Image: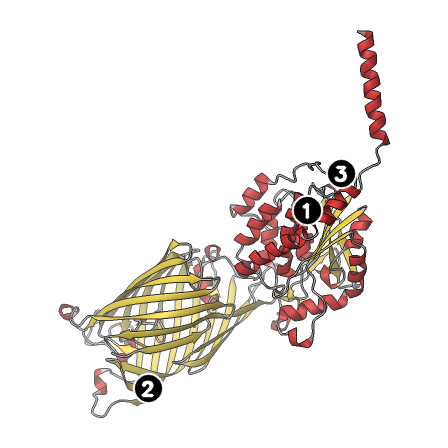
Amino acid sequence: MKKLCYLLLLLLAGILTTQAAQPPRKKVAVVLSGGGAKGVAHIGALKVIEEAGIPIDYVVGTSMGSIIGGLYAIGYTPAQMDSLVRMQDWSFILSDAVNRNEELLIKKQRSEQYTLTVPFKNKPKDALKGGIISGRNIARLFSELTVGYHDSIDFNKLPVPFACVAEDLVDGKEYVFHSGKLALAMRSSMSIPGVFEPVKWKGMVLVDGGMINNYPVDVARQMGADIIIGVDVQEGLVGADKLNTLADITGQIINLMGVEKYNENVQNSDVHIHVNVKGYSSASFNEQAIQVLLERGELAARRNWESLLDLKRQIGIAPNFVPKPHGPFVSRSRRAQEKIDVVPEIDPGEMPENTISVGVHFDNESQAALILNTNVSLNKKKTHQASLTVRLGQQMSGRLDYTAHPFDPKWYVTLSYQLDDNDMDLYNDGSQFSTYSYLHHLAQVNISRSWNSIRCSLGGRYEYFNYKHVLLPSGFDDGTLDLQNQHLITYYGHMQFDSFNRRTYPTKGIKWNVLAEIYTTNGVNFDEGRLCPVISAFWEGAFRVRNRFTILPWIGGRAILNRTYSFAIANMMGGNNPGRYVPQQLPFVGVDYMQLAGSKLFTAGIRFRQRMGSNHYVTLTGNTGVQNDEWQHLFRGMMWGGGLSYGYDTFLGPIEITFNYSNVTHKVGTYVSLGYEF
């Protein structure tokens, strides 16, 4: 027994002596450059580095490289990050838009007609001081993805030690995050000046680190790395002919400002994996670009396969060595993909209620139109707001709203005044038969309750219609339409619902509204001691049948429940969307402009929409309708029509062209539009 113990002691001593004699393994750092969307290629390169069996002891990044590096440092695998970048709605993430499912319906309706909305805190001149985008959505994404790492921590104690680079605008110096809140560090490192609002932290004003050190090999050396594997998506300087977009210009500025340090860091890399990103920019976040960039990152790393294997031998790793598995980041990554509700740890500044908004629209009927709006909070608690809206174009208007929230933010009272100066073309049986212009004064008060998808309102309004010029066919009895100046006092109740997932080209959800109105000329009756009640309703839905194919049915109607009524409240139909020219207009594809209809009007239709590529849409529409002044004759002369549309969804709004036909017009019509309708 003593001999056995003696032999075991000798064996243990030999093992310890051998281990002590072995030199420590060289430390490896992976450095990831900045580059916006081009940085997606880092994921493909990381996949190959792991496949080569090289242990990663440090990860350092700038801008997009800090995001990929930060996620890798806390345990995300390349496969998980591949899925994450594909599943994001980048147009939403890289904006200050609010998720439609999280926004009060009244705010959706007010904001979605604008192309651009810029918040400001005190005065309108402050609106663009920090950047066009505050970064609220990307801050929230970072907070969701870093669940479990929201506290201020030492980045050297992460599963893989991490650092990222930002620039302090106060002194122009480089600031390297080695500790702090991980999400804040990543957000700071990618704050492109003029685009994203800078992050103010500890007396510093931090912006994109790419402005000063876009490929931070030197930072990795300072952390203790012996070997550097760099993944670089930075392009060289380009000529004047290629500086065409904001992304091109931003990239050139970044390259110019840090070119000297960049060249030094390239020379200081042991393996420099340069990814071919030709044809793509820092803003290339569409599906096709992400797929190609992931593939190019992997391809660039595979072209350096032999260099990676040589490096593996150089740092003393056996060819058959398998490093310990990276991660896993199972529970947290799963939670991140489940759209959990996480309060962002980053506060780039409270989103103020003060905004300046602008919208642009063009179509071949009303030509160009511009809408401008400013919304201002009148007190610190934001319980009182004022809004001014001006529309310029063939239809001109100005509107002033005052809103008070006496109980809570979901209850509000609104006082409004609106003045419209309109020139209208009116059609009957498919042919233009009248042109008229008028001033419309509207004063309104209502009390409303709004939820995320529902809004209920009760109110009253006063309207005055002043018809300035009316052109009618010779011999036409204008008394039939009552084209006379008129005062109207109306009481109404309104319910609206909207659960569409997108403001344009929705793929799921429903939308409806029901409006009951009682028109009077003096507040008591309309004519001969009677009231003039009007009931209207409209319903539409979006049902995705397959990934790219959606069916969108609709049905609507409006009935004037009085034998006599004025032209101001007469039913109208035509166009692709309800309320095209006047609030009471119902859509009917195949009838352009605005068509006069009977006092009872009902339309129904269905759209079949196919998405092609990322943002291209082809829509086939069919609709039918009935209209008459008498219920018993309602189904005499059924109307039918249809159209074929091509649309392209852009950041300025949809660009769309529609060819249509109906038995009302008996001719092919064309409608071309650009931008959100308002």
What residue is shown with label 1? 49
Q: Mark 1 falls on what kind of element?
A: helix
386, 395: nearer the viewer: 395
Q: Residue at x 73, y 64 (%)?
A: 211
Residue 332, percent from left and from top: 58, 42
Q: Residue at x 67, y 68 (%)?
A: 250
The Cα–Cα distance between marks 3 and 1, rounded to whole angstroms, is 14 Å
| Vertical position of residue 672 compared to residue 197: above or below | below
**Quarter of the image holding residue 397?**
bottom left
What is the residue that sits farthest to the left in this orientation? 632
Q: Mark 3 falls on what kind of element?
A: loop
What residue is shown with label 3? 317
Q: Mark 2 falls on what kind of element?
A: strand
| Vertical position of residue 219 compared to residue 521: above or below | above
Residue 632, percent from left and from top: 13, 68
Residue 420, percent from left and from top: 40, 80
Residue 589, percent from left and from top: 31, 71
The Cα–Cα distance between marks 1 and 2, rounded to whole angstroms, is 72 Å
Specify which label sits upstream in the sequence, 3 or 1: 1
Q: Residues within 10 Å of mark 3 (few under 14, many from 20)?
A: some
